[in-house]
Amino acid sequence: MGFLYTIFISLFNTLLPVIGLLSPKLKLFAVGRKGVLKTLEAALSSDDRTIWFHCASLGEYEQGVPVMEDLKKKYPDHKFVITFFSPSGYEVKKDSKLGDVIVYLPIDTRANSRKFIKLVNPELAVFIKYEFWPNYLNELKKNAIPSVVISAVFREDQAFFKWYGGFMRSALRTVSHFFVQDTISQALMNQANFTNVTISGDTRFDRVSHQIEMDNRVDFITDFVHNRLCIVIGSSWIEDEEVFIDFVNQASDKVCFIIAPHEIKDATVSRLQQKLKKKTILFSEKEVGGLATNQVFIMNTIGYLSRVYSYADIAYVGGAMGTSGLHNILEPATFGIPIIIGQHFEKFREAKQLQKLAGLFSIRTAEEFSVIMNKLIDNTKFRQQTGMIAGHFINSNTGATAIIVEYLTDKLETDALESLKS
């Protein structure tokens, strides 16, 4: 299996320039990896003390933020190297102040992993939730650099737990410690003879819980909402539009809508506009004035959604009507509001938990969307009680960051003392 992996990953690395011709996203994936090692060589010196965080994409980055922020405060003299696998993470966060160096992770060949680890020379490597790259993990082990996986979730159908998963299990055995989200993950790891596993929970709860403490005011949203009941539709796809468009078009003037499509291409936004019969304004038109005379505000931009949720009385979170995957329900939940999602959320533990608590509702059709939305609008007590459940769900699941940071701090300081002794 290891031999086949080496052949595949080497071939993939060789074909990167060709792969980049297939689509704009793949072009970013391929071109973005050019010159990464030179960037690291220019940005880091042999005297630098570094900590390396790896994120698959944007969601994993957000999970890592609370841990990175805490470690940054404790170790201000260390340089933080953040790597991404996906363009959807790197392109959004490449200018983040959390990282001293932010780059794509070179493809997991033996040569790349050796060069990368030699240049970065981290005192600690932290992998967030997913992404287990055998050559990088083995190289860290060879150099006696501790590696930790945080906010991990394991499922029985993963290769690690199959008869043919020996190669990947071997890679996992190089990891110093796993911090998992739930008892199921811990049990699966224990059954596979991993004892270096701690249940910490999900750092995303800490991340979103901090949002409510911030100044979430957005002046143009305040002007738009103007004391109306506000429904925020976040990260929507075309499949989501099919269930909410009719309701929006028939809604009372006392209700306003903020729609944040997941894709903000002109064609996508234009398609959405054409479906809407209500008076609508775009983010890019907000300077025109008279915002409150519109009933729908389309956020054809990024970076505002977490604050916009603070204005919501009800939230619909997109992604689960189709196959793209449910988007973040924790961001609206932290503001104590009811949440509606689509039907495909089997792999989203937090959504299943919140549904059991009756703080979240799953719908399959436009009719079901209208029924639950009307109930939440018309019954203030029901809406408030449901929202309280969502807010309590967030508050009762915080604390993962403190558990993880305590371990990482101990690991860094212990290793530093041992280094001085030697």
Image (spheres, rainbow, N blue to C red):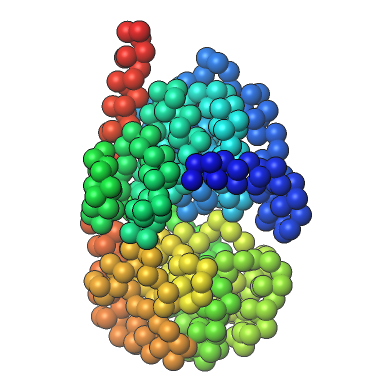
Q: Position of residue 41 (x, y in %)?
A: 64, 24
Q: Report the residue at 53% width, 89% height from top.
A: 246
Q: Between residues 67 and 384, which one lies in front from this camera angle?
A: 67
Q: Report the residue at 71% width, 72% height from top.
A: 267
Q: Position of residue 331 (x, y in %)?
A: 41, 60
Q: In the picture provided, is 308 more to the left or to the right than 26?
A: left
Looking at the image, is 302 positioned above or below residue 73?
below
Q: Between residues 215 and 43, which one lies in front from this camera angle?
A: 43
Looking at the image, is 367 positioned above or below residue 86?
below
Q: Report the residue at 24% width, 47% height from top.
A: 190
Q: Between residues 227 and 162, which one lies in front from this camera angle?
A: 162
Looking at the image, is 388 positioned above or below residue 368?
above
Image quadrant of residue 195? Answer: top left
Q: Report the residue at 37% width, 64% height from top.
A: 348
Whether residue 64 is visible: no
Q: Position of residue 318 (x, y in %)?
A: 48, 71
Q: Quadrant of the C terminus?
A: top left
Whether residue 375 is visible: yes
Q: In the picture provided, is 120 more to the left or to the right than 209?
A: right
